[in-house]
Amino acid sequence: MHAMQYEITLPADYDMGIIRKRVADKGHLLDAYPGLGLKAYLVRERGQDDSPVNQYAPFYLWHTAEGMNGFLWGPGFRGLSNDFGRPAVRHWLGAGLAGGSRTEAPTSATRATVRLPETADPAEAVERALAELPTHPALHTAAVAVDPSRWELLRFALWHGPAPEDEPGTRYRVLHLSRPELDRLPSGRHW
């Protein structure tokens, strides 16, 4: 599993209805994309959920590296880059996945990252993060991943309704969820 996200920060007065329309018109195009576990079409809106910015920030869990590469080198990402400029793409290696109730689409997401101190054992940090994955009834899916170039630990979760108040990290709203191979992503630890 590979996790990936890019963030497009938009002007404070940007009409976020443009992003909502873009997702409504194009979101379904990845609903059957080969190698894609899930794509959560995420937004932050200035003044909502304590967000200081307007932002379009899709988050991906890839089942295959080939699917991820095909997307990045293909027409979808090229079109986004033509419309907004090419964003920096963050990438983490998947370490674990937990599933909750997937009977309804998620409406919110959280993403928390933490740099691992040089003295920390990365395997122990990942084990701790996996043990601390939420088991809340509103959980749809949660993942742990690591960026070894920065030794950064990522915890991402999708929620039915608002995320729990005590859940750490940046909060997003989910406009659409494409999940063609979500059920093929292995649950539990990924090593």
Image: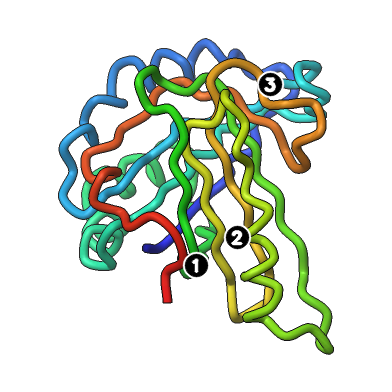
Residue type beneath disc 3:
Glu
Q: Marks 1 and 2: CB-CB under 8 Å?
A: yes
Along the line of sight, which residue is nearer the eye, 190 or 59?
190
Q: Residue at x 75, y 36 (%)?
A: 167
Q: Residue at x 47, y 23 (%)?
A: 106
Report how far apart the C-alphas of labels 3 and 2 lie in the structure.
30 Å
Drawn side of residue 92 relative to residue 115, left or right: left
Q: Earlier in the sequence, mark 1 or mark 2?
A: 1
Q: Earlier in the sequence, mark 3 or mark 2?
A: 3
Q: Nearer the viewer, mark 3 or mark 1?
A: 1
Above-or-below relation of 135 to 165:
below
Above-or-below relation of 149 to 67:
below
Along the line of sight, which residue is nearer the eye, 16 or 115?
115
Q: Nearer the viewer, mark 1 or mark 2?
A: 2
Q: How many marks?
A: 3
Disc number at residue 45?
3
Q: Residue at x 33, y 48 (%)?
A: 77
Mark 1: which secondary structure? Answer: strand
Drawn side of residue 102 relative to residue 93, left or right: left
Report how far apart the C-alphas of labels 3 and 1 lie in the structure.
30 Å
Residue occupied by mark 1 = 95
Circle 3 crowding by C-alpha within 10 Å: few under 14, some 14–19, many from 20: many
Along the line of sight, which residue is nearer the eye, 74 or 137?
137
Mark 3: which secondary structure? Answer: loop
